[in-house]
Amino acid sequence: MERKGEGSENSLMRGSRSTSSTNHTGVRARPDPFLVVCRFFSVITSIAAILCIAVNILSAVRSFENGSDIFDGIFRCYAVVIAIFVIVAETEWGFITKFWKVLEYWAGRGMLQIFVAVMTRAYPDYSEKRKELVLLQNIAGYLLLACGVVYVILGILCIGVVKRARQKKEVSREQAVKDLEELERRREELEALLIVDRTLDFGNPMPSQ
């Protein structure tokens, strides 16, 4: 009877563990759709900025090689540096936003992206030799320009504030899930020790007096 009771108790423990792990999985499986859309848009913006970097590097190399327009090459180098700041801003790295508070706000990011887009499209060379390069400049410039305009509009509508609030909420939820998992792990360790102690007690019964 005692062993039967012990077996049913162990099965109840295993059932509670599986239930709790299922609950934790359910909590993790519900990402915020708003944040998912924001991350997707951030990836699109980063890709547009990378295209601008590639186009400006190609333009700078050709300008320096030909020696025809050194100032255009220097201008393209500045465009590359600023485009790198656009990509870093999309990562929302705390070190950058700490010193460049304007990049924390969507309107500020949008204006920076528009500036890079204008620099990428400035001084186009319409010669036959650079037809492909001009096409890449158009694609990269207009794509980043569209992202910048969207950022400015959403920033004016305070969507960035909503995103930051939801991010804090998501971080708090993830931390709560981690704390619950740690408590569950400790509970399982204590239950395992308790089962071992009971097994030893059943294996070594007290001598009758």
Image (tube, rainbow, N blue to C red):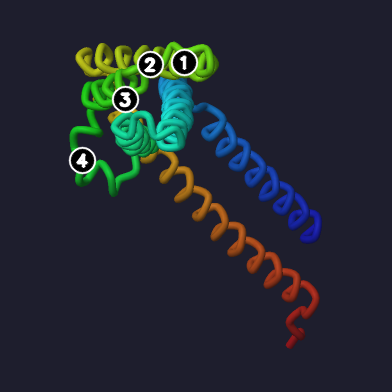
Reply above or below: 102 against 199. above
For the residues bearing labels 1 and 2, Cβ distance under 8 angstroms: yes
In the picture, the quarter occupied by the N terminus is: bottom right
Q: Nearer the viewer, mark 1 or mark 4?
A: 1
Percent x, y of residue 119: 31, 23
* Residue 187 shows up from this direction: yes
How many numbered discs sit on the rendered protein?
A: 4
Distance Cα–Cα, label 1 vs label 2? 7 Å
Q: Which residue occupies the foreground of this view, 190 or 117? A: 117
Q: Which mark is residue 134?
A: 1
For the residues bearing labels 4 and 2, Cβ distance under 8 angstroms: no
Residues packed near mark 1 inside 10 Å, few (<14), some (14 to 19) or many (20 plus)? many
Q: Nearer the viewer, mark 1 or mark 3?
A: 1
Residue at screen point 23% across, 28% down: 105
Q: Nearer the viewer, mark 3 or mark 2?
A: 2
Q: Quadrant of residue 24?
A: top right
Q: Quadrant of residue 141?
A: top left
Distance Cα–Cα, label 1 vs label 4? 32 Å
Identify the residue under disc 4.
Answer: 100
Q: Is residue 16 left or right of residue 132?
A: right
Reply above or below: 79 against 114. below
Reply above or below: 2 against 141. below
Mark toward the start of the polypeptide (3 vs 4): 4
Identify the residue under disc 2.
Answer: 124
Q: Nearer the viewer, mark 3 or mark 4?
A: 3
Distance Cα–Cα, label 1 vs label 3? 16 Å
Q: Amino acid at mark 2?
A: Pro
Q: Amino acid at mark 1?
A: Val
Q: Which mark is residue 201?
A: none
Mark toward the start of the polypeptide (1 vs 4): 4
Q: Which mark is residue 116?
A: 3
